């Protein structure tokens, strides 16, 4: 999987895009209790957020890096609306894209 490094906390992350074309960074390591499912190809990762109560069957679940980045807390204190609208921009602010091919 192509990984990038969070400039803010140094964690390994991957970038994925929603069906609607929104980019989001996701922890590179699967996490039990996560709610993000990745699919697609290595070069074109697609993420899907599980609905409440929905369980991934036979798939690894990941967590949004927004939820786990210790340095993203200040962004998460904003309103829900802000979070949704500014998710991509916030991610871009926080992260340096150290994307490695392969
Ligand atoms: Zn981080």
Image (cartoon, rainbow, N blue to C red):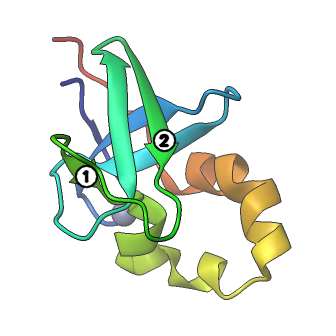
Q: How many labels does the image show?
A: 2
What is the x, y in percent for residue 101? 23, 12
> Left or right: 72 with respect to 57?
right
Q: Residue 48 has which mark?
A: 2
What is the x, y in percent for residue 27? 28, 53
Please tell me in which quadrant of the rendered image residue 32 appears. bottom left
Q: Residue 61 has which mark?
A: 1
What is the x, y in percent for residue 60? 18, 45
> Left or right: 46 with respect to 79?
left
In terms of image quarters, where does ligand 1 lie? bottom left
Residue appearing at x 52%, y 83% in the figure: 73
Q: How far apart are marks 1 and 2 (CA)?
A: 10 Å
Residue 16 visible within the image? yes
Q: Which of marks 1 and 2 is nearer the N terminus?
A: 2
Residue appearing at x 64%, y 76% in the figure: 75
Density class for disc 1 (Cα within 10 Å; few <14, some 14-19, many ≥20) is many
| Pick the front one: 57 or 30 | 57
- The relative height of residue 19 versus residue 35 in the rendered view (above or below) is above
> Left or right: 87 with respect to 15?
right
Determine whether label 1 and label 2 are within 8 Å by CB. Answer: no
Element on which disc 2 rests: strand
């Amino acid at each position: 999987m192509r990984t990038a490094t969070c400039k803010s906390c140094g964690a390994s992350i991957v970038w994925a895009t929603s069906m609607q074309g929104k980019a989001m960074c996701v922890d590179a390591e699967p996490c039990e209790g996560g709610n993000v499912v990745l699919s697609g190809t290595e070069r074109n990762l697609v993420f899907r957020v599980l609905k409440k109560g929905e369980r991934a069957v036979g798939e690894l679940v990941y967590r949004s890096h927004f939820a786990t980045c210790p340095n993203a807390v200040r962004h998460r204190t904003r309103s829900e609306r802000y979070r949704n609208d500014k998710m991509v921009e916030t991610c871009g602010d926080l992260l340096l894209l150290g994307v490695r091919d392969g």
